[in-house]
Amino acid sequence: MMSNSMPPARARILFCLLLGVFSTFFAEVASGSTLFAFTSSFGLLFVFPLYVLHITVLSAIVFGFGRPRFYALYAAGTLFGMYEAYMTKILWISFLPNGPLVKIGGVGLIELLVLVFFWHPLMAFIVPLGISERLLTSSRTVPLIRTRGRRFLWVMLATLLGANQGVYTHSPLRSLLAGAVAMLVLGCSAVLWRRTGFQHYGLSDLLFSGKGLALAIVLLLADYMLLTKAIKPEKLPAISSQVTIWILYAILLTLFVAHLRKSQSFPVVDYDDSDLSLGCFEGLLLLMTISSAIVATVLGGIPGFGAVVFPVLLGLSSLAGMSLLGLALFDLLRRSPSPQPARAEIACTAMPHGKAAQLARDPR
């Protein structure tokens, strides 16, 4: 049952740091991009703060000005992924050794589809936010795979994430070490959080608002300026290529605002039939680690096989990015439901989550 009192400032700070831990894991460790983000100086000084600030600010805006509807979260996640322009320069220089295969206005098309429209919205934002909510809070408002009767989907997700990671680790030993570190860091973080007793608060209560959110926004902007100058400043392109990024920011910000406004017409849904225990989560991390090690072993034993797998992953990820963006745009054309009675909305935020869900379904 959720607590009726507001959490202290230290609870919000600690929770947002934990959100950053989960976001960093799913976005960087699971992708094989920064396998040891929690044990390297680069990971702790550059990568981790980036994810903490992004997920803190964007989740607070979604919950403060809208509802945690999937498309509102997705639109926020696309803005999350845009850090790959100025901070890392990847949208210009690419993650491919020979540069972008296709450029539009100086920006890599595949990089844009994979990172901005697929990976970051899901793996840096929605998935870590939803899993953190289920493991660390008493609410269930972020849409995720329902575990009851659908554990096979979680198993498939963990297996595919591990396989994806294994393509980039190039070593089963690195896969096992990265998995061991992740299980230790995420598991211990969840256990220590539960010992504080703060897990009785709902997700929306633990996010920043007011002055706390304003300070987080200032820190995020400062991080943008710092990393823009610290990471490959010589790769910053001409203004003509930067204009494309500015236009993309304007389009994605418009999409985000539109989905925020539309989400206000929807009640806060409580997924009370969706749960995820810490033991189950650790088991999924173990499965992911084993899958990663197996794929890394197979790729290492078959010369040239990686050259086939990598383009397939890029193609599937690009297709997923296009599909998600298309669905997000199409959703704006659909009619919103009739406004809910005020008492139904109040119940969804103030009542225990089981009762809130029942009232949201039938506000009479």
Image (tube, rainbow, N blue to C red):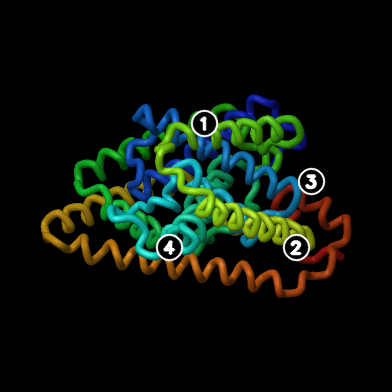
Say which of 131 and 220 sits in front.
220
Q: Earlier in the sequence, mark 3 or mark 4?
A: 4
**Closer to the eye: label 3 or 1:** 1
Q: From the viewer's perspective, is residue 181 above or below residue 28?
A: above
Relative to residue 291, is residue 63 drawn left or right? right
Q: Disc 1 marks which amino acid? A: Leu
Residue 245 in view (yes/no): yes
Q: Nearer the viewer, mark 1 or mark 2?
A: 1
Q: Amino acid at mark 4?
A: Lys
State the residue position of label 3.
Answer: 350
Q: Say which element carries label 1.
A: helix
Q: Position of residue 362 (x, y in %)?
A: 80, 66
Q: Earlier in the sequence, mark 1 or mark 2?
A: 1
Residue 71 percent across, percent down from the top left = 63, 62
Q: Mark 4 falls on what kind of element?
A: strand
Q: Is residue 123 left or right of residue 292?
A: right
**Residue occupied by mark 2:** 262
Number of other residues with Cα within 10 Å of mark 4, as a class: few under 14, some 14 to 19, many 20 or more = some
Q: Is residue 305 above or below residue 13?
A: below
Nearest to the eye among marks 1 and 4: give it: 4
Is the Cβ of the residue at disc 3 closer than 8 Å to that at disc 4? no
